[in-house]
Amino acid sequence: MEISASVYRTGASGLILLGVIGVLIGIVMTYQLAMTLQQFGANNMIVGMLGLSVLRELGPVITALIVIGRNGSATTASIGAMHITEEYSALRVFGLSP
């Protein structure tokens, strides 16, 4: 049961954040790419170039960074909560390494 909860917290709850960030990055990249391609008269290639660059290259990198950041901050917060509730002290009393 804990594994499914961890998978849900890691993946499914972050989809909205990933979607919003993906749309915003797409808007910025489209604007910058349109300005550059307009100089060469290749405005009709924006969608194809943007789709390839985001899906193949940038999408997995941004997704990994967001998931790592969210999980790292959640782990840090749970460790801080354990210190506040003195769970680490209880583990030391039992002779276990926290």
Image (cartoon, grey):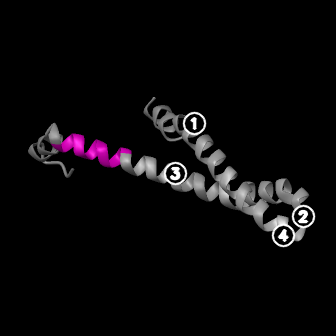
Which residue sits at x=12%, y=47%? 92
Q: Position of residue 86 (x, y in %)?
A: 13, 40
Mark toward the viewer: 4 or 3: 4
Residue 77 in magenta? yes
**Does dot 2 land on a helix, a strand or a loop?**
loop
**Disc on the earlier residue, 2 or 1:** 1
Which residue sits at x=16%, y=37%? 85
Give how far apart the Cα atoms at labels 4 and 1 are: 35 Å
Q: Position of residue 38 (x, y in %)?
A: 84, 64
Q: Can you identify the residue that label 4 sits on?
A: 39
Asked whether the beta carbons under mark 1 and mark 3 sit within 8 Å of each other, the answer is no
State the mark number for residue 42.
2
Which residue sits at x=82%, y=60%? 49
Nearest the eye: 56 or 39:
39
Mark toward the viewer: 2 or 1: 2
Give how far apart the Cα atoms at labels 2 and 4 are: 8 Å
Q: Position of residue 61 (x, y in %)?
A: 61, 59
What residue range appears in magenta?
A: 74-83
State the mark number for residue 66.
3
Asked whether the beta carbons under mark 4 and mark 1 sit within 8 Å of each other, the answer is no
Q: Is residue 65 above or below residue 15?
A: below
